[in-house]
Image (cartoon, grey):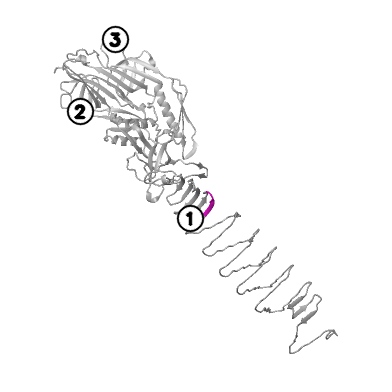
Amino acid sequence: MPTGTMPHSRHTSRHRLQIRGHPGPQPEVVGFHWRDYGLSRSYRITVDCVTSTPMAAPWVPGCHATLLVAGRRRPVHGIITGVVDLERGPAGHYLRLSLESPLGPLARSRHQRVFTRLDVPRILERVLAGHGWQQGDWRVACTGECPVHPFIAQLEEDDLAFISRLLAFEGLHYRFEQGPEKPVLVIQDDSRSAVDDGAGTLRYEPLRGGVRDLHGFHRLTAAARLLPERVTLRDHDPERPESLAPVHAVTVDSIPGQGTEAHWGAGFRDIKEGERLAWLRLQALDCERRQIRIHTHCTDLEPGQRLSLKGHPCSDFNHTYVVVRVDMEASQAHAMPMGGACEHRPGPRVRVDLLPVEQPFRPRYRPHRVHGRLVARVDGDPEEGPMLDEQGRYRLRFDFDDTPHPIGRASAPVRLLTPYAAPGGGFHFPLHPGTEVLVGFENGDPHRPLILGALPNRDQPSPVNADNAGQNLLRTPAGYELCMDDRAGREQLRLAAHDADLHLTLDAAQDTHRLILETRRGEMAWQSGRAMHLDIGTDQQVEIGGDQGVRVRGDVLLITESGDIRQQAAGDLLLEAGEDLQLQTRRGDMLQHSEGAMTLNAGADLALMSEQGHLHCRVPRGDAEFHVAGDMLWKTTAGGIRIGDDSACILIDADGDLVIQGREVRIEAETIRLQANRITQNGT
């Protein structure tokens, strides 16, 4: 613990700290230590200081402070994030202040949100704007353009880790330019464009106990690591279901490598983009294959600065580099009056990590994986129904995302997990806007969501609940449903539409087993391109409320194997044939009976034939009348023709004889002619 009295008025500190808005005297710096002051690093500084008056700790955190280091042309700005009151000594109140870069607050903010159709610099701009950054607080100094990403999600990740990951994915790095009033965040894609920023050259000067040269370095250490020599990336594009061919990048560094670093789901959609990412990942490995570190007393070094080394005994190190990281610690307790027990540490100690200037700096990309599941809502206008793209994908609104996205812009197209998919086939029930769904992530990548299924809730309740727990039910918003009922005594399968006005029911309840096809208000059409077979085990009953029409292009055959056929009409019964009409019984009799008149009408000939039995025409009460326009012919093949009864008749026998028999026979005419070969009377 440093001790001593406050410096008198003639003392001037070499290192100073200025706290913006501090009402009292500025604290005197006893010593400081900073680390992570480098490319793609958010630096932290610890400052030990002493003040003559107590510093009100509650208001100090969050204040902006500036550290002015002897020998540096630029101050270093930071935000005070911690205050520790060490103790009170003869020199005053000893404090330890913790400072962070302007990016420090981002590490204390965690958001769950979505960005669509943006490149990484524009996403960075939105994140920084959310923390109050203004134009001029940061700038992009990239030589190329970044691709636009259709969907980026920040999940379970603080803001600093989020933007650092996105920058590393694209091979970008950041650094701070320390200005007189504030630091400026600079985003770059090529460290090889670094310029000489003042330090220029450091010459090797080993320690000899004399005055230390602030423009030299006294120690150099070099380290090498055996890392993979090859990077292989593979991915797939849902637009083209076949997996993309793997892309490779092989190191050309002088330090040999060994092994392959392979990644699946690397985040590219075409081979060209995959090759670019593979080289970025390989260059990040190349940055770690070798490490050049120098020790110096020069404090005027900045990350991203071009620096040349000269005079080292090993000429291989006399080269031009880019400053990657600067760590520094210094104490000036020895220069303060009554420094007490403070250790005497003349001059600052500076450690600098360097990268050969021809080697581009790339931060190591470490993907962020999300292994849980999230809830989202299907995006779209409820008035217009399901909103799908040409591939049947949906847009989602995540419950955690408060961004006011326009309809259809809250996400990129998201695929729905279905039970079945095949070329020319598939299984898909469209999800309506507002449907709550469960979302997972392909390969744990938060930028690749998948809809795992729909979730019932109060607004979209499940069709199966405690009241019908035995039913297996599928129901659409339009009222179509498929129900497989497993409840005891109610076993059935029902396909219904519009509140069951139209339904097909397969009733399998005990002792029932029936099939019902019913349309209560509409029409029913049966159509078969080829044969249709209807097989009924017992009885069939057909009831028709109106007319029935049966039209057959070919023959009609109605057969009963053992029973009768009965046709009954409340009105007329008409049998009409375009050609012949044949009524035939093979074994039994045929009876045609009419309570009223019966008319047999033929447009051509009319034939009544009895092949084996007799033909009887009987009129019990009325007359029998035969009226023909032409001749009337009664003819038999072998028997005779008899007209009459037992008392009187006209008989034509098989031999051709004509017999007129009666009690009295009268022949009346205007003229009677008798002509024969022989005429007999009473047998003579």
The quarter of the picture where residue 23 lies is top left
Which element is circle 2 on?
helix
Between the residue at mark 3 and the residue at mark 1, the CA separation in whole angstroms equals 103 Å
Residue type, mark 3 in image = Arg
The image quadrant where one finds the C terminus is bottom right
* Along the line of sight, the residue nearer the viewer: 4 or 672: 672
Which element is circle 1 on?
strand
Mark number displayed over residue 208: 3
Circle 1 residues within 10 Å: few <14, some 14–19, many ≥20? some
The boundaries of the magenta stretch are: 510-516
The image quadrant where one finds the N terminus is top left
Q: Residue furthest right?
A: 684
Q: How many marks?
A: 3
Can I make out residue 372 in this image? Answer: yes
Q: Which residue is mark 1?
A: 502
Looking at the image, tell me whether mark 3 or mark 2 is earlier in sequence order.
2
Residue type, mark 2 in image = Pro
